[in-house]
Amino acid sequence: MRREPGRWSGIGTSAVIAASMIACAGSAASPVVSTGPGPSVQPLATAASGATSASIVPASAAASPTDSGPVRFASTQYPYALTLPATMLTRRWAAAQRVWDGVQRFDMLGPLLDRVGVPDGGLYLIGGAAPSGLQEFTDRGVAKTNLHHDCTKPTGERSVKVGAVRGVAFSQDCAGQFLVRVTLVREEQGVIAFILANAAAETRALDDLIELLAGLEWTAP
């Protein structure tokens, strides 16, 4: 990922006060994280079989800025994995502790989300069944976020594509935190990803989020 001067300025600056949105997150389950050359990433496609082995980083270990090569996180609860450059990780991955059933409300640091630190903020992901398609899954994700936070209606909604998968992007203010969100659905499986952002840098924040998701792959058939 590019590291242009100021590229990430403004994104996630509200993360310092994000504790106001926590609802008692517990200890994270052990994620599967690998470093080094490892398997090639197929953006938003089922992982290729026969991939070469890669070293395993324990859940308690954080990727340091001096680590080289990509770091692959495979969710223990949802059928996706995400590969990011090691130099982009400012905090270790925290794995979701249990599966979102599509009904429960969820918050940023609760037990239903996978999350990782990136420059100046955090990246949050959650998966779920989406048998009724993209729009219904998007609306449901918004509704379940609103159950926990005082959120505004989504604004700036637009269609996006990450790899070959179609999605919806929009912005939302929740309890004073400005979020940029992308929702993707592939073969009745959905992923919601969001980052904290500065409202003045909304367009750039969305571009950054889509760039982060370039390493996303679906691990279910």
Image (tube, helix red, strand yellow):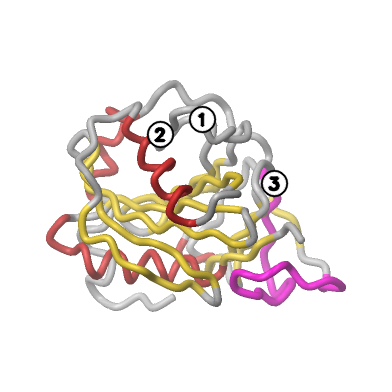
Q: Which image quadrant is residue 180 in?
A: bottom left
Q: Amino acid at mark 2?
A: Lys
* Disc 1 element: loop
Do the residues bearing badges 1 and 3 touch, measured as CB atoms within 8 Å? no
Marks 3 and 2, how far apart at CA = 32 Å
Q: Quadrant of the C terminus?
A: bottom right
The residue shown at (22%, 48%) is 178
Marks 2 and 1, how far apart at CA = 7 Å
Q: Which residue is mark 3?
A: 58
Give whichever of discs 2 and 1 has the lower sequence position.
1
Q: Nearer the viewer, residue 61 or 107?
A: 107
Say left or right for 165 vs 13: right
Neighbor class of circle 3 (other Cα within 10 Å; few <14, some 14-19, many 20+) is few
Q: Position of residue 8 (x, y in %)?
A: 28, 65
The residue shown at (23%, 30%) is 150
| Residue extent of the magenta highlight | 31-52
Residue 91 disc label: none
The residue shown at (54%, 35%) is 102
Main SS of the magenta segment? loop
* Disc 3 element: loop
Marks 1 and 3, how far apart at CA = 32 Å
Q: Which residue is mark 2?
A: 144
Do the residues bearing badges 2 and 1 touch, measured as CB atoms within 8 Å? yes
Q: Amino acid at mark 1?
A: Val
